[in-house]
Amino acid sequence: MDAYFEARGEKNFSPLVTLLVVDVNMNWFSRVWYVNRRAFYQALPVVTADDFLKVAREQGENYYREAGFEEFVFVKAEDTFRAAAVQSDAAALLANSLEARGTAPKEITRPRGIIAFKVYEFE
């Protein structure tokens, strides 16, 4: 995951313009190390996929754009970095919706090639 953020070095995240959407099923260490740390150091707002979809459903799909967000980065945990028990299917629903719209994820793999995370960037 660090490699993903480092590769974006030329295109820095802009606080209050980029919204980081995360999978609530991500295990706690991954969430703290990869997501919360980046959110803290780069001052990125973070929302779970559950809350993202709930607000979009209740307030309309343009809610976040009207609030000033221009870019969305959704991090979905794959099997190796999921919590022991799946708490929600919101991340799977969001991933399926994005892929149906033609948004292909960037795959973050472990050293042996196993997919750890899928990262979707969308506007």
Image: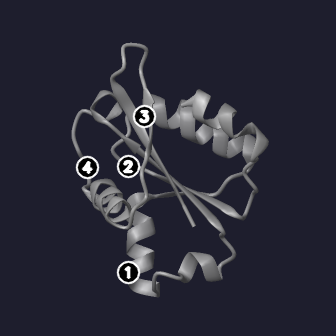
Q: CA distance from mark 1 to mark 3?
A: 27 Å
Q: Label 2 near label 4: C-beta < 8 Å?
A: yes
Total marks shown come to 4
Query: Which residue has dot 1 on it?
Result: 57
Q: Secondary structure at mark 4?
A: loop
Category of crowding for the residue at label 4, using alpha-carbon neighbours closer than 10 angstroms: few (below 14), some (14–19), many (at least 20): few
Q: Amino acid at mark 4?
A: Gln
Q: CA distance from mark 4 to mark 1?
A: 20 Å
Picture coordinates of residue 78, whole percent (x, y) = 32, 36
Q: Earlier in the sequence, mark 3 or mark 4?
A: 3
Mark number, residue 24: 2
Question: In this view, which residue lies farthest toward the left?
Answer: 85
Query: Which residue has dot 4 on it?
Result: 87
Residue 83 in sight in this render: no
Q: Nearer the viewer, mark 4 or mark 1?
A: 1
Q: Looking at the rendering, in which quadrant would you find the C terminus? A: bottom right
